[in-house]
Image (tube, rainbow, N blue to C red):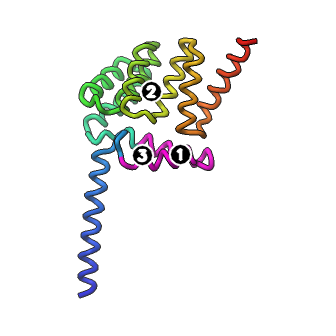
């Protein structure tokens, strides 16, 4: 009798876990309830390896729209962007932001594409949309810094990389970019 009750309780627990796991996956994106704890851990990461692992988990959540069609478009656009098929990537990302304007990663992916295409103002516009939806988006903030570097806006670039470091203190790329900017600004002031 005890075994039967235990088996029923275990089965019910598995079912509840499966339902909750599906519910979390279905709602995953910049509003995912796992993100606040991950960002807290990222800020306090004791090493670059730990920070990198946490960053990867955050990126994985950001890439989950909860909609198979959107996820497929995001993947298609990312693959096209990787092989520099910019028209195909733009088509996919346009469809993502049209269908899910509340999905931050769609805007971020298109901002990255616009940066690669040299369309800096369009990239800045999409970065602004990304950050309106997810102010902690360290990828978009890094992009903001890079676009401002391309536009020779050193102070704005430095502010963007400082914002990255406030969220992700172990970001080596942001620290290197900030150090480079500070060196340039120091030389200009001499």
Mark nearer the N terminus (2 vs 3):
3
Residue 35 is labelled as: 3
Residue 42 is labelled as: 1
Q: CA distance from mark 1 to mark 3?
A: 10 Å
Q: CA distance from mark 1 to mark 2?
A: 27 Å
Nearer to the camera, 181 or 7 = 181
Picture quarter with the C terminus: top right
Vertical comparison of 133 with 7: above or below: above
Please say if the residues under marks 1 and 3 sit with CB atoms less than 8 Å apart: no
As for residue 38 lying within the magenta part, the answer is yes
State the residue at coordinates (65%, 29%).
176
State the residue at coordinates (60%, 47%).
49
Count residues near mark 1 (Cα–Cα under 10 Å), then give few for <14, some for 14-19, many for 20+. many
Q: Which residues are magenta?
A: 33-60
Residue 129 image offset from top left, x and y in percent: 37, 25
Vertical comparison of 44 with 98: above or below: below
Give SS at disc 1: helix
């Amino acid at each position: 009798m005890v075994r039967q009750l235990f088996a029923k309780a275990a089965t019910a627990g598995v079912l509840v876990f499966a339902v909750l796991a599906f519910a979390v996956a279905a709602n995953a994106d910049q509003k995912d309830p796992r993100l606040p704890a991950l960002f807290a851990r990222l800020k306090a990461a004791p090493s670059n390896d730990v920070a990198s692992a946490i960053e990867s988990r955050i990126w994985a959540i950001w890439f989950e729209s909860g909609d198979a069609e959107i996820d497929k478009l995001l993947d298609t656009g990312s693959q096209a962007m990787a092989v520099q098929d910019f028209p195909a990537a733009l088509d996919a990302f346009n469809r993502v932001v049209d269908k899910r304007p509340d999905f931050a990663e769609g805007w971020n992916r298109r901002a990255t594409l616009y940066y690669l295409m040299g369309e800096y103002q369009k990239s800045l516009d999409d970065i602004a949309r990304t950050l309106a939806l997810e102010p902690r988006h360290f990828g978009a903030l890094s992009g903001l810094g890079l676009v401002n570097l391309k536009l020779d806006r050193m102070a704005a670039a430095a502010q963007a990389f400082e914002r990255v470091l406030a969220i992700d203190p172990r970001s080596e790329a942001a620290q290197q970019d900030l150090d480079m900017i500070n060196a340039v600004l120091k030389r200009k002031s001499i």
